[in-house]
Amino acid sequence: MSRSLPLSMRTVRTIAELRALLRTLREGNRRIGFVPTMGFLHEGHAALIRQSVSRCDSTVVSIFVNPTQFGPGEDLAQYPRDLERDQTLCHRLGTTVLFVPEPSEIYPTGYCTFVDPGPLGEPLCGQFRPGHFRGVATVVAKLFNIVQPDLAFFGQKDLQQTVVIRRMVRDLNLPVDIVVAPTLREADGLALSSRNTYLDADARARALALSKGLFAAQEAFEGGERDADRLLALARKPLTQVDEVQYLELVDAVSLDAVVGEVRRTSALCVAARVGRTRLIDNVLLAPNADEAQFISHLEAE
Ligand code: AMP
């Protein structure tokens, strides 16, 4: 059940203002939920915010296009922004505080401390975006320290990110529970992403190849197929439509190690491809012994 809307959502730009508000919101041991985003919000973000609003007493949403997770030549400067629209959506969804810091608030002059996620940041997207997960782990650790949430909500759409963050929380003993929510998609299967706005009509049509292949493999898996190579071949078929396949891999959903032979544990079939100038990622979970919900609680218990 969602709680009643706050009378008005506060938008704050400084850590000091946010901390002052949080002191009041936390009184009486009330639960704080947190949804970190880079803005240009869509229904995928909205689903995370709705979960937080329904499970927590107050919800903090952050919008921060984090420069340390972008490499040279990536889309940091072009990343889409629409703060007014995001504010309206967040308010409508029942967000209590919207935190929109400037880069200098998060990384003041002389900033030099980073969180290194080690080997979990290296495969998959890490091969093509060196330093990306170091930037992600660093900003999420900082935001967790600033907000000190009880629960934090992330999307399975960024599967490697969820694996990196869960491990960071465990390794650094951060007192927060991580909730991972399923990927929201357009009616035709394309995973929602702020970057979909870069796609023209032709690229939008060809972008469907990612989800099409993943769904074909998922369907075969549900029909009993367990062979990694055959599942990968099914997912690869439609990828002739894209301009560059960066990776298509079947990995263990906890260790990110490649699955060789049979799928025996919960695994993730992950793809990254370029369509026109846009880089897209997507994944599906293949769980031989449990459904997705059990998989998620299994991870939470680790
Ligand atoms: P971003 O603004 O892209 O950094 O995403 C913020 C959060 O929203 C991350 O936890 C993402 O995994 C999540 N997210 C992005 N796209 C989707 C989607 N299609 N479905 C569910 N969650 C999503």
Image (cartoon, rainbow, N blue to C red):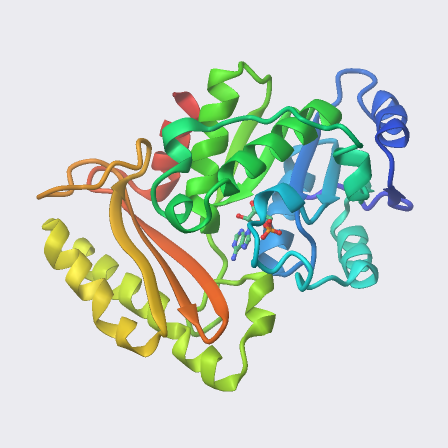
Would residue 48 be found to the left or right of residue 229 on screen?
Answer: right
Pick the front one: 205 or 46? 205
Decide: is 120 above or below 201.
above
Q: Residue furthest bottom?
A: 202
Residue 210: x %, y % from top left: 35, 67
In the figure, residue 135 lies in which quadrant? top right
Q: Residue at x 30, y 31 (%)?
A: 255
Indicate the position of residue 59 as horizontal and vertical percent values.
73, 37
Image: 228 above or below 300:
below
- Tell me where residue 160 appears, x and y as whole percent: 42, 42
**Horizontal side, residue 227 vs residue 140: left or right:** left
How many marks are shown on the rendered structure? 0
In the image, residue 219 above or below residue 24: below
> Which quadrant would residue 266 be assigned to in this image?
top left
* Front in this rendered view, residue 55 or 19: 19
Q: Quadrant of the C terminus?
A: top left
Q: Quadrant of residue 79?
A: bottom right
Residue drawn at x 42%, y 67% as measured from the top left: 274
Query: Left or right of 275: which side holds 44?
Result: right
175 to the left or right of 258: right
Asked whether residue 224 appears in the rendered view, the answer is no
> Closer to the camera, 178 or 205?
205
Q: Is residue 84 visible?
A: yes
Quarter containing the N terminus? top right
Residue at the (76%, 34%) spot, across then down: 106
Q: Position of residue 32 (x, y in %)?
A: 71, 28
